[in-house]
């Protein structure tokens, strides 16, 4: 993905931080990180409106940093290319789970795993019986997850 350079595009007199990040094919958050690290020039601020902006010269310098992979302070910088043409999920057709037993216990195991808790299906089933002897049908899913998580942490499941 080639970066827009001053030879390919006529630059505006001034652009906002969001527009500068877009010209560099970066997210605004990542752009601010790189400004803080001294890779790109920081914006200048209008005294009247206090809004940050980049002049045409500053735009050219930032675009040169992106093209040459050498920051403003002379440090080497590696940029990852974002492919905007292809979607994140390249699979076609419906998604099928590799699990044969999909149910509330497997869902809880998966959600507990995303919270950093490696619990087995049996441990989750035991926790459900202890915490909800009458079943979880009338309970909110997030409340069930919270209560099971706390129970398993007290039991020492890591």
Image: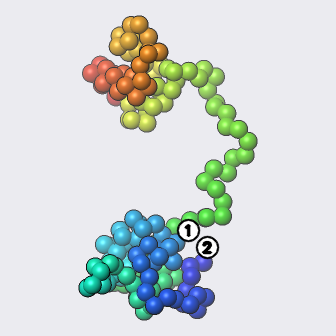
Q: Residue tagged by mark 1?
A: 81
Disc 1 and disc 2: Cα gap in Å?
7 Å
Q: Is 131 located above or below residue 78 in the figure?
A: above
Q: Is 81 located above or below residue 44 in the figure?
A: above
Location of residue 50 in the rendering, given as x and y in whole percent from the top left corner: 28, 79
Quadrant in which the N terminus is drawn? bottom right
Along the line of sight, which residue is nearer the eye, 27 or 74? 27
Along the line of sight, which residue is nearer the eye, 88 or 12? 12
Q: Which is nearer the N-term, disc 1 or disc 2?
A: 2
Give the number of marks. Answer: 2
Residue 145 seen from this side: no
> Tag 2, which secondary structure?
loop
Quadrant in which the C terminus is drawn? top left
Q: Residue tagged by mark 2?
A: 1
Location of residue 117 in the rendering, given as x and y in whole percent from the top left corner: 38, 30
Q: Is 146 located above or below residue 86 in the figure?
A: above
Q: Quadrant of residue 94?
A: top right
Residue at horizontal 40%, vertical 71%? 31
Residue at horizontal 51%, vertical 21%? 104
Q: Badges 1 and 2: C-beta atoms under 8 Å apart?
A: yes
Residue 65: numbered disc: none
Location of residue 61 in the rendering, given as x and y in whole percent from the top left corner: 43, 88
Q: Quadrant of residue 99?
A: top right
Residue at horizontal 52%, vertical 82%? 67
């Amino acid at each position: 993905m080639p970066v827009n350079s001053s030879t390919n595009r006529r630059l505006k007199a001034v652009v906002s931080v969001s527009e500068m990040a877009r010209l560099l094919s970066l997210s605004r958050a990542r752009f601010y990180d790189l400004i803080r690290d001294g890779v790109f020039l920081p914006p200048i601020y209008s005294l009247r409106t206090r809004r940050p902006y980049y002049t045409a010269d500053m735009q050219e310098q930032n675009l040169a940093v992106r093209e040459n992979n050498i920051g403003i302070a002379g440090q080497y910088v590696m940029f990852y290319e974002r492919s905007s043409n292809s979607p994140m999920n390249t699979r076609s057709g419906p998604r099928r789970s590799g699990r044969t037993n999909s149910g509330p216990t497997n869902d809880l195991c998966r959600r507990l795993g995303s919270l950093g808790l490696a619990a087995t299906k049996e441990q989750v089933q035991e926790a459900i019986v202890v915490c909800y002897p009458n079943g979880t049908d009338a309970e909110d899913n997030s409340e069930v997850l919270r209560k099971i998580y706390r129970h398993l942490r007290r039991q020492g499941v890591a």
